[in-house]
Image: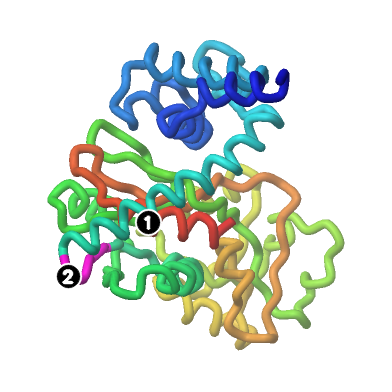
Amino acid sequence: MSQVRSINTIKGGLGLRELQAVLAVAELGSFRRAAAALGYTQSALSHQVSALEAALGQSLFDRPGGRAQVRLTPAGEAVCRRARRVLSEVEAVAADAEQAARGESVRVRIGVTQTSAAEIMPAALRAFRDDYPGVEVVLVAADEPEDSRDALRRGELDLAFSYNSETDEYIEAIRVVDDPWVILTRRDSGIAGLDDPGFEALEGQDLVAWTRRWRGQVDLEDTWARRGITPRIVYRTDDNLALQRLVAAGLGHACIGRVVASGAVDPSLTWLEPHEAPPTRTIALCYARHRPMTATARTLITAIRAQSA
């Protein structure tokens, strides 16, 4: 009987709203931002999280106070893993109903960068299509962050990938995967065998770089300048494939995201992870706060994040 009472106590504080609240706080690192994203007051959201913690008899978050980011406890991580599965199934039910009610193909439009289009979406769409073969997913080239944000506000895109996206009153972002800078080089290069490489390995080396219209490249070069590292930039490009081919041809090393480096197009290439911390790079999915998100789009987000993890 004690076990039954325990289960009933947990059920009393366990609902979809409570699970959504915990996941939102975990994703956004803040009760305030999570409340804004879900459309609750902060006190209401805190109450939902506290109710679940009380029902489980476990603290789900470390709350340092002030403006510091809250973090999941081990119990919180376990709850979030299970909550994602539960909410994924609920989203799938809603997506099925939405598609059946329309009696037609459902369309989701996603603004994609070169990295997300080539390295993230294929696996995600393969998994998504098994359950939703009738959904039309449109991938729209969207490398310029401001253009993507404008398209989201106008309703021309449902979702858009972005690096280090800043949220505001119009746009919210969901983290997909960290994509730190790594050094791309040939396997037979002079730096490929370094045991503990750092960016100083690029000092005086020929480098293939992105053009400086990309904020990430500017931040990276500024970091090198502060550390007194001065590689020779011999080529610049905006094309992911071209950059890899230039490195494979032995025309220089490069700094690219780990996501792309892990799937390098040429077997002669390898990558080194610098021991020092470079500028932060996080790939996120953005959506417009003021536009209702379809159940199908939410299910696709779940598939993307699952495959990226």
- The structure residue drawn at horizontal position 21% and vertical position 43%, both measured from the top left corner, is 292
Q: Position of residue 297 (x, y in %)?
A: 31, 55
Q: Position of residue 109 (x, y in %)?
A: 25, 63
Relative horizontal placement of residue 65, taking residue 299 as reference (left or right): right
Q: Is residue 272 magenta?
A: no
Secondary element at image label 2: loop
Q: Quadrant of residue 266?
A: bottom right
Secondary element at image label 1: strand
Q: Is residue 258 above or below residue 42?
A: below
Question: Which one is in front, 99 or 60?
Answer: 99
Q: CA distance from mark 1 to mark 2?
A: 27 Å
Q: Is residue 106 magenta?
A: yes
Q: Position of residue 204 (x, y in %)?
A: 67, 65
For residue 243, say whether it is visible: yes
- The structure residue drawn at horizontal position 54% and vertical position 57%, both measured from the top left corner, is 306
Q: Is residue 17 above or below residue 273?
A: above
Q: Position of residue 267 (x, y in %)?
A: 68, 86
Lower position in the chain sequence, tag 1 or tag 2: 2
Q: Which residues are magenta?
A: 103-109
Residue that lies at the very extreme toward the front in this rendered image: 1
Relative horizontal placement of residue 223, taking residue 115 as reference (left or right): right
Quadrant (top left, top right, bottom left, bottom right) of the C terminus? bottom right
Quadrant (top left, top right, bottom left, bottom right) of the N terminus? top right
Disc 1 marks which amino acid? Phe
Q: Which residue is mark 2?
A: 104
Tell me the tag on residue 161: 1
For residue 215, say whether it is visible: no
- Quick check: marks 1 and 2 in contact, CB under 8 Å? no
Front tag of 1 and 2:
2
- The structure residue drawn at horizontal position 46% and vertical position 30%, both measured from the top left corner, is 15
Disc 2 marks which amino acid? Glu
Residue that lies at the very extreme toward the left in this rendered image: 154
